[in-house]
């Protein structure tokens, strides 16, 4: 009997008799002998729960988590504090174990929380229509590109170099399949400079704040896009939207982004969720599930999956997306977190991030051998340029238990030895001071080593 | 419209569409059978005025909650008008498929195409 | 924030149970307490000029923690779930979600690991991913695995994009992908997203792919055939060897949709059947909880000739760490040795010139990998095989019990063949003789505290009911389900109206989906 099953020998005998066969073997008779696996799977035998737990614990011990070092890593996923009520709610069986709510009468919990989530995303982004989640940030950018392509059937995307490199790569993978071209809009002083746009541009894609942490003038980009009849897609970091002009206010048609920082764990990159919001005009092109309000036969309010004709199970080859399973539980964590932060709390948190980030930027720019990559306003992340090989500097910092940030030299060679530093509310003044100290020492040591190596 | 009905003054296409020919123009819609199969209509995606339609080819879609249906052109021509009231009241397609639930009006490219369509009796016979 | 403003269409007052979190809000209430500002405060206008700032704060709820907890707890009680009752949703494999998995996924070494952590300091995670890859390769019979795709659909997308890359690498451009008419909707949707045109292949009277139709449609303009085996009818494609010959004969790839893998683990393998690419649904056979609609994961396994095109990055195992001094320097946390040169080194390989690129950020849904890996380690080879055997046993037993209860007279099996892990019934006789449809049967099942099977799929069966019990159900549960269905049919003979107006015992009754689609209300008005 395999773990988690209940079919004892006695059960099996009875069941086989009821079916009218002599053995389980017979139930597989239609599979040609040639195709049967003639040996057991070359996989270890099963283990007890205790042994499996110990093994997973040992594997966990082989990872340096944000509990083990002072981390300033960001680039889309951030070490925020997730309040205890999130996991106490999402681990409830009733939220954790059901399937997609295709039978709405017994899924009001899931459907109503989707409606509440959609409302929260709509408020953050300033756009009226949100779906119930996509997988994560970069594939949400590609999904938005698919909407633009199907909406106006033009040949080209203009994508800012300030959009997350992984989002640009994901979009490029899909654009190749669609036979579409990608033109990059470069960065000047850390913000996007759009080229002249013609009537073959399907969408302009920008990020807010951009990958180097700079706040962009999304309204200007949207105006330029609309002037050429193109859509504007704004990939955004959700917490800064508590303060920044919303994509909707700026005239964007679609806002997408990575939702991990809203109540979700780091989990080495997933699962998290992607959010997607759009104008009313695009409602029938929106990918993924959408929960809608209605009433039942007794006049009671209830919620259902709506506009299902957009989706794969009905529209099949003409669906707005192939997405089926999305990230419902992670989106639920998101709306619980946003409810916990609340209208005032999210502003307070964002302002705290702004102040601490400003402090960090001031401390670090004053470090010998460290310069800001740009002077644009930032919210919670910013790029630096080091006067020493960035990976060697990082390695030295790590020896002191500090992970100073993400090296940029591969994705942004024009910055030389770039470093992206992210601040969350878990990084206090003392942590930032320590970063400045350790980074300073590391840069110094590397410059010293270089000077020695090149001396005489 | 609760009971099946197939007006005699219309011409019918096997894909469950009707045409009312008036001179060099015609009005198109879907039949009682088509709306009954579809269920309650929730959305009609109007074609563009000026677009060309070709006999036997789909020119638009009608949606119910759980299905999408292509709508086929019974005759060829250029769209001169679409029924704007369907945007707010798609249920007109169910309630009055031959009247207020009309879909599009077309300037005919070849009126003789009417000869390849069926009359009400012939169309009804195909439904058995 | 509005006073308990009802928003039900028609202005009906919502009962307390049904209020949204926004309707519970009151100005000034809050849960969050901000950490103290410990840095010198600068004027916000200096740091973020007013021209960059939004006019009004987002109108998020204003509620304290007790209210949030009570709200979502009460909402949860309006959900049916797998931990509470039988969930025989065909094609979804609703098997038990082991409770150990939440414990191991929550270990800080897994849960608090940043995706950009240097590989030398994420050796536990990369080793776990590598070992999971090895296990999936063995289960599928295809040697090379990518864990990157986020769900089955994304795995399918990866498969078709890999196919495109494979053909382009040979200097060919093909424009079509074949899929059976019984295919799950994600297959044709994926084909279009991948830039191909889908062509449907018919089914014969035995429920198999129609080989003549396949032969006619398999031209050298076909890039791929996407297939599920067992099919979505729950039947083994007995012609699979001939299918393989036909498809490979025109130079196309053969793609395996792994949604029905639960029938065959350890029994037979798609790689051995000749498939080039396979996707797995970790949220089906590998117990990742469905979460009400995700998260899941859709890893893929491919043959040697498809390997070069796999997404970037790939998790690989090397004999030792890279020679770059910078990465090997510093291991200050006293953790398990990683960069010290002794023993294998697990790494992310980005150097893949023929790769299709990325389908998403970072490495994929790692938290899901942790749970799937724990499952495989718990069951082992014999356990996985037994799971599939019992899944098939349970399905056949349930079918036999339904027959015994007289249910199959009204809901006959769509095809008279031994089923595998699921079976399809047709409600057409029930509709004609008892005047209730499959939909009505499903809604009446809700009143009996059971989740209905999948309805109206696959499309080729009239009034379809697709039933998949899975291996984690007891015999008694299956007996009880058969009795419940028989009871509903008996009741319908007396009074069909009860089922037609069902459900009666649920938090809400049948909902007006037409109104919801005609005039969509998709957020709280404010």
Image (cartoon, coloured by chain):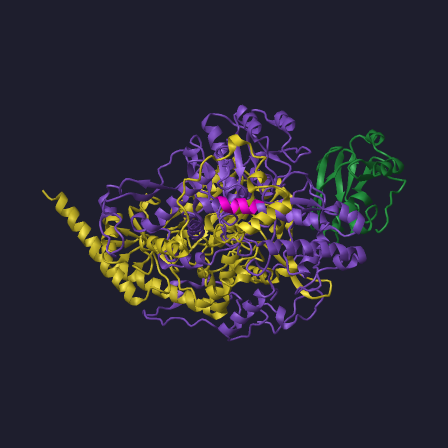
A165, A132: nearer the viewer: A132
- Find residue A66 and report its horizontal and vertical position in percent: 33, 59
- Look at the image and give the colour of chain A: yellow
Count of numbered circles in the view: 0
Q: Is residue A92 above or below residue A220?
A: below
In x, y percent, where is residue B16?
79, 39
For the residue pair B3 and A379, the one nearer the viewer reads as B3
- Rendered residue at 23%/47% (across/down): C340
Q: Colour of chain C?
A: purple
A315 with respect to A85 (left or right): right
Dominant SS of magenta comes to helix
Q: Where residue A174 appears, x then y in whole percent?
A: 49, 40
Residue at (63, 34) in percent of width and height = C208
* Position of residue C135 measured from the top left corner of the image (x, y, whole percent): 42, 43
Q: Is residue C220 visible?
A: yes
Residue under the point 55% across and 25% down? C245
Is B26 or C369 nearer to us in this picture? C369
Residue B115, picture quadrant: top right
Q: Does residue A229 appear in this view? A: no
Q: Which residues are magenta?
A: C385-392
Furthest residue in direction left, as rendered: A456
Q: Quadrant of residue C412?
A: top right
Chain B is which colour? Answer: green
Q: Is residue A420 or residue C31 the one in the foreground?
A: C31
Q: Is residue A408 magenta?
A: no
């Amino acid at each position: 009997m395999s773990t988690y099953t209940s079919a004892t020998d006695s059960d099996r005998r009875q069941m086989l008799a009821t079916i009218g066969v002599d053995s389980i073997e017979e139930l597989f008779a239609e599979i040609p002998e040639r195709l049967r696996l003639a040996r057991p799977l070359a996989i270890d035998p099963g283990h007890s729960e205790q042994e499996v737990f110990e093994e997973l614990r040992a594997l966990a011990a082989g990872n340096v988590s944000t509990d083990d070092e002072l981390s300033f890593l960001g680039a889309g996923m951030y070490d925020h504090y997730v309040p205890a009520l999130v996991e106490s709610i999402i681990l409830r069986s009733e939220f954790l174990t059901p399937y997609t709510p295709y039978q709405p009468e017994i899924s009001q919990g899931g459907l109503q929380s989707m409606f509440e989530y959609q409302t929260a995303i709509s408020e953050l982004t300033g756009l009226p229509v949100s779906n119930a989640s996509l997988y994560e940030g970069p594939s949400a950018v590609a999904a938005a590109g698919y909407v633009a392509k199907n909406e106006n059937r033009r040949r080209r995307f203009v994508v800012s170099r300030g959009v997350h490199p992984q989002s640009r790569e994901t979009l490029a993978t899909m654009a190749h399949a669609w036979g579409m071209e990608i033109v990059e809009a470069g960065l000047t002083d850390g913000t996007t400079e759009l080229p002249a746009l013609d009537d073959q541009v399907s969408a302009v894609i920008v990020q807010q704040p951009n990958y180097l942490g700079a706040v962009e003038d999304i309204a200007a980009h949207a105006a330029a896009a609309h002037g050429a009849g193109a859509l504007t897609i704004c990939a955004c970091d959700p917490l800064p939207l508590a303060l920044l002009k919303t994509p909707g206010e700026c005239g964007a048609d679609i806002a997408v982004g990575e939702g991990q920082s809203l109540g979700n764990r780091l989990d080495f990159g997933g699962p998290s969720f992607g959010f997607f919001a759009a104008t009313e005009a695009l409602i029938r092109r929106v990918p993924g599930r959408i929960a809608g309000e209605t009433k039942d036969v007794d006049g009671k309010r209830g919620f259902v999956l709506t506009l299902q004709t957009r989706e794969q199970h009905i529209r099949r080859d003409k669906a707005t997306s192939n997405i089926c399973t999305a990230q419902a539980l992670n989106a639920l964590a998101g709306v619980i977190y946003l409810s916990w932060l609340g209208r005032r709390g999210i502003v307070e948190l964002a302002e705290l991030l702004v102040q601490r980030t400003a402090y960090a930027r001031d401390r670090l720019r004053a470090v010998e051998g460290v310069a800001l990559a740009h002077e644009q306003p930032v919210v919670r992340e910013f790029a630096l340029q080091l006067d020493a090989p960035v990976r060697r500097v990082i390695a030295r910092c790590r020896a002191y238990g500090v992970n100073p940030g993400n090296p940029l030299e591969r994705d942004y060679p024009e910055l030389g030895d770039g470093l992206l530093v992210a601040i969350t509310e878990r990084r206090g003044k003392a942590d930032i001071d320590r970063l400045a100290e350790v980074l300073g020492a590391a840069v110094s040591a590397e410059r010293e080593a270089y000077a020695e190596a090149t001396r005489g | 419209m609760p009971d099946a009905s197939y007006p005699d003054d219309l011409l019918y296409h096997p894909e469950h569409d009707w045409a009312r020919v008036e001179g060099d123009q015609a009005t198109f819609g879907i039949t009682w059978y088509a709306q009954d199969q579809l269920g309650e209509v929730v959305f009609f995606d109007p074609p563009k005025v000026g677009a060309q339609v070709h006999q036997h080819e789909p020119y638009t879609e009608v949606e119910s909650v759980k299905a999408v249906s292509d709508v086929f052109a019974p005759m060829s021509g250029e769209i001169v008008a679409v029924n704007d009231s369907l945007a707010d009241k798609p249920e007109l397609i169910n309630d009055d498929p031959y009247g207020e639930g009309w879909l599009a009006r077309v300037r005919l490219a070849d009126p003789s195409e009417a000869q390849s369509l069926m009359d009400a009796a012939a169309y009804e016979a195909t439904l058995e | 924030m509005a006073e308990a403003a009802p928003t039900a269409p028609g202005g009906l007052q919502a009962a307390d149970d049904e209020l949204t979190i926004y309707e519970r809000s009151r100005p000034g209430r809050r849960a969050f307490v901000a950490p103290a500002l410990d840095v010198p405060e600068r004027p916000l206008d200096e740091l973020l000029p007013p021209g960059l700032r939004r006019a009004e704060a987002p109108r998020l709820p204003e509620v304290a923690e007790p209210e949030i907890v009570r709200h979502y707890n009460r909402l949860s009680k309006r959900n049916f779930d797998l931990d509470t009752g039988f969930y025989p949703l065909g094609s979804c494999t609703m098997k038990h979600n082991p409770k150990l998995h939440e414990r191991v996924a929550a270990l800080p070494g897994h849960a608090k690991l940043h995706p950009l952590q240097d590989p030398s300091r994420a050796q536990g995670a990369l080793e776990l991913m590598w070992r999971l890859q090895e296990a999936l390769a063995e289960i599928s019979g295809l040697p090379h695995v990518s864990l990157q795709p986020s769900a089955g659909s994304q795995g399918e997308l990866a498969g078709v994009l890999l196919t495109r890359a494979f053909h382009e690498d040979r200097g060919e451009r093909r424009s079509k992908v074949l899929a059976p008419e019984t295919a799950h909707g994600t297959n044709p949707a994926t084909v279009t997203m991948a830039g191909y045109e889908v062509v449907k292949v018919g089914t014969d009277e035995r429920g198999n792919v129609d080989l003549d139709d396949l032969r006619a449609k398999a031209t050298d303009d076909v890039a791929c055939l996407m297939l599920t085996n067992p099919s979505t009818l729950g039947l083994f494609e007995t012609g699979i060897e001939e299918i393989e010959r036909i498809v490979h004969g025109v130079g196309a790839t053969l793609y395996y949709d792994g949604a029905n893998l639960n029938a065959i683990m350890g029994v037979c393998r798609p790689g051995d059947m000749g498939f080039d690419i396979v996707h797995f649904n970790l949220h089906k056979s590998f117990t990742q909880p469905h979460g009400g609609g995700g998260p899941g994961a859709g890893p893929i396994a491919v043959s040697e000739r498809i390997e070069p095109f796999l997404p970037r990055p790939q998790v690989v195992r090397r004999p030792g760490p890279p020679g770059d001094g910078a990465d090997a320097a510093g291991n200050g946390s006293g953790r398990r040795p990683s960069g010290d040169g002794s023993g294998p080194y697990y790494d992310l390989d980005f150097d893949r010139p023929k790769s299709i690129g990325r389908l998403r950020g970072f490495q994929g849904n790692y938290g899901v990998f942790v749970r799937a890996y724990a499952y495989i380690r718990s069951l082992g080879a014999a356990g996985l095989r037994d799971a599939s055997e019992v899944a098939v046993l349970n399905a056949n037993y349930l079918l036999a019990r339904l027959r015994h209860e007289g249910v199959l007279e009204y809901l006959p099996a769509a095809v008279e063949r031994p089923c595998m892990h699921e079976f399809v019934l047709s409600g057409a006789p029930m509709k004609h003789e008892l005047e209730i449809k499959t939909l009505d049967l499903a809604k009446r099942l809700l009143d009996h505290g059971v989740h209905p099977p999948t309805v109206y799929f696959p499309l080729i069966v009239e009034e379809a009911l697709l039933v998949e019990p899975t291996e984690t159900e007891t015999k008694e549960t299956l007996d009880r389900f058969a009795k419940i269905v028989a009871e509903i049919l008996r009741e319908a003979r007396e009074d069909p109206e009860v089922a037609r107006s069902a459900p009666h015992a649920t938090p809400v009754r049948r909902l007006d989906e037409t109104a919801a689609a005609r005039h969509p209300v998709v957020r709280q008005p404010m």
